Amino acid sequence: MAAAPPAAARRTPVARRTPVARRTPVARRIALTGAAVVVLALAVLLSLAVGARAVAPSAVLDALLHGGHSAAAEVVRELRVPRTLIGLMVGAALALAGTALQGITRNPIADPGILGISQGASVAVVLAIAFAGVHELSGYVWFAFAGAGFASLAVYAIASRGRGGATPVKLALGGAAINALLVSVTMAVLTTKAAALDEFRFWQVGSVAGRDTEVVAQTWPFMAVGVVLVIAVARGLDALALGEDVAKGLGQNVAAVRIVGGLGATVLTGVAVAAAGPIAFIGLAVPHIARALVGSDHRWLLPMAALIGPIMLLVSDTIGRVIFPPSEVPAGVMTALIGVPFLVTLVRRKAVAA
């Protein structure tokens, strides 16, 4: 009987700690998500106010809320609002696509480029410029979107053949093969059609400058579809992270999770690449940043990634406007300059599993 009190004493601290341990992560996630929303709002204001011509925040609000007619208001409405909207959409799309692809392939360095999706869009744009006479950004949208979809289907068709179906390793290898093939096709067209080179080079570098609200109007329905598809498989991605056998034991249809999640990632990548060109590293870096903040639960990870992606893109674009005035450094270049040190740090800290 003398042993009973110590046992009760041992149980009491556990009972007291358990509810706290369950509440703390949720409270922390809510706080960090709220902080990300605030930072995103500041990034939007920065994007609208900063550039070759600085605009006071009061003038930005006057242009947006009161229809001001000053020169600064016209700059904000006609140039910076479309640019900022594209940045919001593209940043969120690439971040969500990268998060979904890393979950599907269980590969921490997966991004929309590893499966050849971005390169598929690039090939389609090259062909449109060289052979279809398309010279407007609104025309690129549809070709880029179709090219991304074709590349994704080709990769999945290759990976799904043979025993075991579309495993993560086969998806990665199939994506590498398709990517190499599409790069060769792109180079072949550009070397034989020199007139298309300059126009394609402007698109290939990746930028949110020079876009208008027409691009947003053309692509936002596809963006909405991609977001719904990716969010729909959040629980499936959590189960898949534990391994295929465990996911099946938990009642998940692994093939359906991969198909729906892959389709959503393809749609989102197509939207982003069509609207702004192949902007690098957002799909790779943002999921890791979001995972470090809110953990690996995709019900929290996906929304956080959708907030951090636009922050990274808008801040990169804003820095690119002012770093070498009066010229601008395209957002695609700035995200790569930011992303390369991040990737090196990730490898040095052994955060990427071998």
Image (cartoon, rainbow, N blue to C red):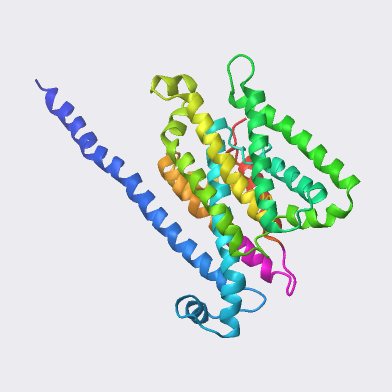
Image quadrant occupied by the C terminus: top right
Which portion, as a residue range, is magenta?
Answer: 314-329
Tell me if residue 87 can be seen: no
Q: Residue at x 64, y 66 (%)?
A: 319
Q: Position of residue 27 (x, y in %)?
A: 33, 50
Image mark count: 0
The vertical placement of 19 against 250, above or below, is below
Query: Is residue 199 something one can see in this rendering?
Result: yes
Q: For this rendering, which residue is in front, 45 or 186?
A: 186
The residue positioned farthest toward the left in the image shown: 1
Residue reaching furthest to the top = 163
Where residue 206 appears, as percent x and y from the top left, is 70, 55
Give the x, y percent position of residue 89: 55, 55
Q: Which residue occupies 64% across, 18% down?
A: 161
Q: Is residue 232 above or below residue 289?
A: above
Does residue 270 appear to the left or right of 130 in the view shown?
left
- State the residue in front, 345 or 162: 162
